[in-house]
Amino acid sequence: MKIVHPIFDESIIVDECGINCLLVENGNDFYELVSDILNQIGNNDDGFFYVINNNDETMNLHKDAFIITDPFLFSLQTKDIKNAIIKDITKIAQHDQSDEFTLLKQEITNYIQKLVLQYDIPLVYDNEIEISQILKIINIGPNDGEENKIKRIINWFVIISDILHPKIIFTINLFSILSIRECEALISEIKKTGILVVNLQSKISYDSQNVKTLIDEDSIQLFVQ
């Protein structure tokens, strides 16, 4: 798989699973790179960032990519993740042969009707209740409560992969919140999952010997501009 962008003199070859890191220390280049990726993921044709698969096909990042722009503030409780969960559970409910939801809808309708009759003016309401509406009301979403930092990040990638099925996950400055040992642990664990992650890094604070260890022993792709 290749990454192409004008700031790189040539296309960047990335591993198709595990964490690939692109280190871009020039601030203007980093801004241009991230902006172009966000435009592509946001279905805006502006920008010149491309991911090309092994069949020389350009990946549609709007459909096939996910990005974590701020690892300090990121939560799995995003709209697209929740909507995907609601869609999946709705499908499960549609194949449920029991009459539990029918009985529940009737109880809810009866209770609402009881409340409406006690109101001072006549009211109208929609009594056709769908399971998706209830799931939205209860604010259903993935469990994001893991306290261990590495396990929490791994959980992000696994849940995003399982629910949204992106072909590639981008992160911005993920290594900035990790120690060298945490980076090593994360790289090792993500490699096992088969998930493709590309981390865009504007700065590496580790010394060159440690960075080289990450590259050689853990197969992280590190490119310096």
Image (tube, helix red, strand yellow):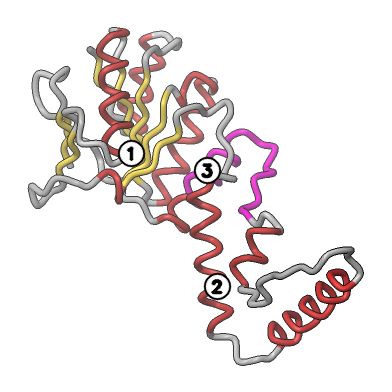
Q: Could you give the CA–CA distance between mark 3 and mark 2, rounded to whole angstroms? A: 27 Å
- Residue 144, percent across and down? 64, 45
The residue located at (20%, 28%) in the rendering is 47
Which quadrant holds the C terminus?
Answer: top left
**Secondary structure under badge 2?**
helix
Q: Is residue 152 magenta?
A: yes
Tell me the kind of residue under disc 1: Gly
- What residue is pinned by disc 3? 154
Residue 133, label in figure: none
Q: Could you classify mark 3 by the number of other residues whose Cα lies within 10 Å: few (under 14), some (14-19), or many (20 or more)?
A: some
Which of these two is toward me, 117 or 69? 117
Mark 1–mark 3 Cα distance, whole angstroms, equals 24 Å
What amino acid is found at the position of numbered circle 3 in the picture?
A: Ile
Circle 1 is placed at which residue position? 42
Q: Which callout, 2 or 1, points at the residue further toward the start of the chain?
A: 1
Task: Give the percent coordinates (x, y) of residue 210.
Answer: 41, 16
| Circle 3 SS class | helix
Query: In this orientation, which residue lies closer to the viewer: 52 or 60?
Result: 60
Q: Quadrant of residue 219?
A: top left
Q: Is residue 73 above or below residue 64?
A: above
Mark 1 vs 3: CB contact within 8 A: no
Q: What residue does disc 2 label?
A: 90
At a point 55% along the width and 63% down the height, the residue shown is: 86
Task: Give the percent coordinates (x, y) of residue 61.
Answer: 27, 43
Q: Kindly state the secondary structure of the residue where label 1 is placed.
A: loop
* Left or right: 34 as drawn, with respect to 192: left
Residue located at (33% from left, 31% from top):
38
Report crowding for label 1: few under 14, some 14 to 19, many 20 or more residues within 10 A (C-alpha). some
Q: Which residues are magenta?
A: 141-159
**Residue 156 visible here:** yes
What amino acid is at disc 2? Thr
